[in-house]
Image (spheres, coloured by chain):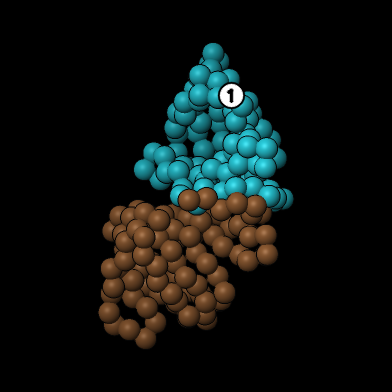
Chain colours: A cyan, B brown
Amino acid sequence: MTYENVTLDPTANVYFDGACVSHTFFLADGTRKSAGVIFPSTLEFGTEAPEVMELHGGSCKVQLPGSEEWTTYAAGESFSVPGNSSFGIEVTETLSYVCHYG
Amino acid sequence: MTYENVTLDPTANVYFDGACVSHTFFLADGTRKSAGVIFPSTLEFGTEAPEVMELHGGSCKVQLPGSEEWTTYAAGESFSVPGNSSFGIEVTETLSYVCHYG
């Protein structure tokens, strides 16, 4: 699966000393997305806009805001996070993802 | 600087257990490139097609094929590697790059 006719920022986003690396790209209509990886680690990400994390590879457990539960997600699945919140993620197998903002 | 009207493969390329992470993308004319990072490490990359490594951030020393010399390159500089060869690279500060193939 590829994204066509996008604008790519070639400078990578590096978070948590390299535990997460992504590239930001924009669809023709200006919609912002990022494609990235998260290596085995336990992290907490803050959100500004709402996010949908679409998993292309690997697996993880996620704790969504307001929940004590850790839910497992794997390639082919997605999870949604409200804006102006945060989520915990425990990556058990290197995660390849696309993050859809807004 | 961004690349417009490209096709992006959202699944990341992960090399050397995460020391290098990149995304492959194609210009409208089909030309293949990749945008990535290399974290501080000493690695050897093989090439198939000739490559031009254009550095957007960080710094490194590079040993090109047929040379005993290690040459320093930093953001804003590029180095070329013949096809079907390899190059040594010692990254001293996380490198952000675009690789131009062919």
B71 over A3 or under it: above or below: below
**Residue B39 position within the rendered picture, expressed as x and y whole percent measured from the top left:** 37, 54
Q: For mark 1, name the chain.
A: A
Please, which residue is most extreme toward the top here?
A: A66
Q: Looking at the image, which residue is at 55% across and 15% down?
A: A67
Report how many numbered discs are placed on residues in the image.
1
Pointer 1: what residue?
A50
What SS does tag 1 mark?
Answer: loop
Q: Quadrant of residue A33?
A: top right
B69 over A29 or under it: above or below: below
Q: Looking at the image, which residue is at 42% across and 43% down?
A: A14
The amino acid beneath tag 1 is: Pro
Q: Out of A46 and A27, give the one closest to the viewer.
A: A27
Q: Looking at the image, which residue is at 40% across and 56% down?
A: B56
**Residue A66 position within the rendered picture, expressed as x and y whole percent measured from the top left:** 54, 13
**Residue B47 position within the rendered picture, expressed as x and y whole percent measured from the top left:** 51, 75
Identify the image quadrant of the C terminus of chain A.
top right
Query: From where the camera sits, is residue B55 visible?
Result: yes
Q: Looking at the image, which residue is at 68% across and 64% down?
A: B29
Left or right: A11, with B9 as reference point: left
Query: From where the camera sits, is residue A37 visible?
Result: no
Q: In which quarter of the image is residue A49?
A: top right
Please, which residue is most extreme toward the bottom here?
A: B66
**Residue B32 position within the rendered picture, expressed as x and y whole percent measured from the top left:** 61, 65
